[in-house]
């Protein structure tokens, strides 16, 4: 059956990458992305609004993003939407929306020494509370 | 601040009938949910299916058209942007969700009940939208009825998309 699920986003990373190994030995990297939108409202006033998304990358893309992503970097992402619904202990359904990254491109230049300086902490402690923000699978 | 870009393309089937509302200022907004299936072969060689459920918002005239012509099970192609929302529940928990705000919605397949000919005209009889489709006994289309399977009681028809 024909089907299509494509997302293209250009925005800024909201946190440093959270890269970890999955049980099958492949890497997985999780990121946050903010995408701004600006428009003029009916009164001609300038308005803006940001949307926040969870990104998930696997294998090579995960390695690449784990190495070069830094909070604040501008990135163009091509991916697909994924939803996961889980039922918590209270019996409530909670739906998680992720964007699975197929391809990405950094749009800013970060000199190597700058990249080194901005390196996230080795213990992975740079990503606050991320474990609850993502459900993947 | 440099440019931002936000575009999403989804093809799939409605999982429930659309809902039309009007804002206080009189703008129409239509909400519906759609399911997009992705088929892939797992590492073990097994064919699998992953379904993505998204909520779609359509504003204005296009939203009214969606409410008038679409119903559960119908295939659509949606082009729009992704929008995140966050809110607090009554017990103070933070929740967030991602919706699609559609710029355009194209109706795929042929109108229900008809013989598949052309144009997107509504059916003459004004049925309540919650009723199951595929009636009329004309051996015609039975898009969502009688096939309650895994996903939300709805399995998309294999032969309905005309390409």
Image (spheres, coloured by chain):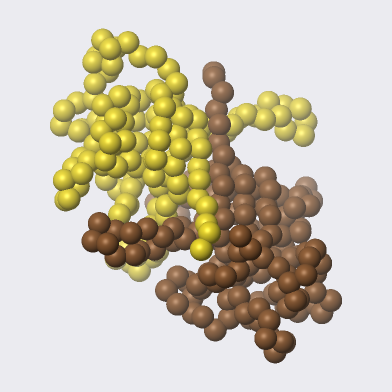
- State the quadrant of the C terminus of chain B: bottom right
x, y percent for residue A71: 35, 25
Asked if one can make out residue A94 in the rendered structure from this viewpoint, the answer is: no
A46 or B131, nearer to the observer = B131
Could you tell whether B104 is left or right of B92 in the image? right
- State the quadrant of the N terminus of chain B: top right
Look at the image and give the colour of chain A. yellow
Q: Which residue is at a point 62% across and 79% down the rendered structure image?
A: B142
Could you tell whether B74 is left or right of B50 in the image? right
Could you tell whether A107 is left or right of A113 in the image? right
A105 or B4, nearer to the observer = A105
Identify the image quadrant of residue B16. bottom right
Identify the image quadrant of residue B124. bottom right
x, y percent for residue B75: 61, 63
The brown one among the chains is: B
Up-down relation of residue A57 to residue B71 (above or below)? above
Asked if one can make out residue B145 in the rendered structure from this viewpoint, the answer is: yes
Q: Which residue is at a point 62% across and 54% down the rendered structure image?
A: B77
Could you tell whether A100 is left or right of B77 in the image? left
B58 or B122, nearer to the observer = B122
x, y percent for residue B42: 29, 58
The residue most toward the front is B163
Q: Which residue is at a point 39% across and 14% down the rendered structure image?
A: A109
Up-down relation of residue A134 to residue B129 (above or below)? above
Q: Which residue is at a point 47% across and 60% down the rendered structure image?
A: B37
């Amino acid at each position: 059956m024909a089907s299509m699920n494509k997302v293209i986003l250009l925005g800024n990373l909201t946190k440093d990458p959270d890269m970890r190994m999955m049980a099958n030995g492949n890497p997985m990297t999780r990121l946050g992305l903010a995408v701004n939108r600006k428009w003029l409202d009916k009164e001609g006033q300038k308005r803006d609004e940001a949307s926040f998304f969870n990104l998930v990358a696997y294998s090579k893309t995960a390695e690449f993003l784990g190495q070069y992503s830094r909070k604040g970097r501008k990135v163009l992402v091509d991916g697909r939407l994924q939803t996961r619904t889980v039922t918590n202990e209270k019996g409530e359904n909670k739906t998680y929306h992720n964007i699975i990254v197929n391809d990405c491109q950094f749009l800013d230049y970060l000199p190597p020494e700058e990249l080194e300086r901005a390196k996230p902490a080795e213990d992975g402690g740079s990503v606050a509370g991320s474990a609850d923000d993502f459900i993947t699978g | 601040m440099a440019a931002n870009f936000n575009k999403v393309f989804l093809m799939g089937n409605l999982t429930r009938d659309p809902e039309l509302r009007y804002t206080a200022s009189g703008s129409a907004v239509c909400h519906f949910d759609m399911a997009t299936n992705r088929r892939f072969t797992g590492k073990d060689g097994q064919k699998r299916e992953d379904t993505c459920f998204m909520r779609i918002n359509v504003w204005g005239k296009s939203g009214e058209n969606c409410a008038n012509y679409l119903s559960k099970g119908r295939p659509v192609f949606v082009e729009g942007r992704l929008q995140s929302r966050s809110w607090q529940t009554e017990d103070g928990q933070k929740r967030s969700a991602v919706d699609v705000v559609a710029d355009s919605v194209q109706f795929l397949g042929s109108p229900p009940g008809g013989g598949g000919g052309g144009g997107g005209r509504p059916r003459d009889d004004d049925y309540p939208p919650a009723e199951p489709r595929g009636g009329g006994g004309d051996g015609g289309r039975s898009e969502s009825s009688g096939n309650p399977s895994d996903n939300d009681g709805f399995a998309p028809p294999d032969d309905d998309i005309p390409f």
